[in-house]
Structure formats: C-alpha cells, structure tokens
Image: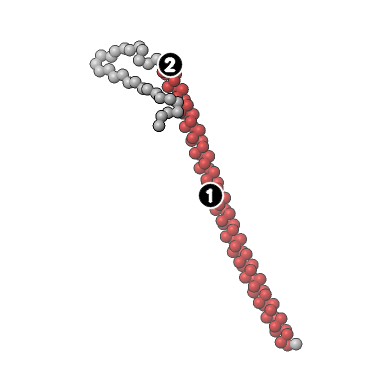
Amino acid sequence: PGSRYGEKVVTFALNVGKRKIHKLHVKGDHLVRLANTVHESRRTLHELEGEAHFLQERTRRHMLIQDSTEFRVAWYTVFESLFMFAITIGQIVYVQRLINQRAWV
C-alpha cells in the first residue's frame, strides 16, 4: 500500500574519511516538503489522540451510567418484591379474618 500523498524517495549520503561538502544534496524545496509532511503527520496524530481520549471518556461515562442504572433496577426489584410480599401477607390475614368472622355468624 502506498502513501496517500504519493511516493517519497529519501536519499542518504555517507562519506568516509575527509568530509566533502556537497551543496546540492539537500535543496530547500525538499526541506519544505518534508516539513509539511511532518507538520501534517503531527496534526493527524494530535487529532487521533484527541479522538482516543474522547472515546475513553465516553466509554467511562457509559459504564458509570450502566452501573448506576443496574444498581437502581436491582434495588427497585428488591423493594417491589418486598411490597408484593407485604400485600400477599395482608391478603392472607384479611381472608383469614373474613373466614373467622363468618364461622361465628
């Protein structure tokens, strides 16, 4: 897979021994294009880091909401079960009183 900006060629010069001065190895245009590519890469990396941070925070918030909702649903279920149990006991007592009152009549 190639780069979306086109192909790039990097040339390295290695001198052994006395240092030779080559004025035409690196041209100003090459440095400008390289600087632009580095700047674009840095900007893209910054955007990706921001998006990754956003996704981490969103996931953390969703987990907090899910845990809170699960906790509330569990307690609601417990209270509802206790309420239904109390109603059942109340109905049993009421029916027993009705039966006992009719037995004396």
Residue at label 1? 63
How far across and how far down the image is residue 15, in percent?
27, 17
Name the residue furthest bottom. 104
Residue at label 2? 29
Name the residue furthest right. 105
Q: Nearer the viewer, residue 71 or 39?
A: 39
Side of 8 relative to 94 (left or right): left
User: Up-down: is 74 above or below 48?
Assistant: below
Residue type, mark 1 in image: Met
User: Up-down: is 43 above or below 77?
Assistant: above
Placement of the C terminus among the 4 image quadrants: bottom right
Quadrant hosting residue 34? top left
Quadrant hosting residue 94? bottom right
Placement of the N terminus among the 4 image quadrants: top left
Tell me which residue sits at (45%, 26%) in the image.
5
Mark 2 vs mark 1, foreground winner is 2
Tell me which residue sits at (43%, 25%) in the image.
6
Tell me which residue sits at (49%, 29%) in the image.
43
Side of 86 relative to 3 (left or right): right
Query: How many residues crowd mark 1 within 10 Å: few (<14), some (14–19), many (20+)?
Result: few
How far across and how far down the image is residue 40, in percent?
47, 26
Tell me which residue sits at (49%, 35%) in the image.
48
How far across and how far down the image is residue 37, in percent?
45, 24
Disc sitting over residue 1 in the figure: none
Side of 26 relative to 71 (left or right): left
Residue type, mark 2 in image: Asp
Query: How many residues crowd mark 2 within 10 Å: few (<14), some (14–19), many (20+)?
Result: few
Quadrant hosting residue 88? bottom right
Name the element at disc 1: helix
User: Up-down: is 83 above or below 5?
Assistant: below
Count of numbered tags: 2
Q: CA distance from mark 2 to mark 1?
A: 51 Å
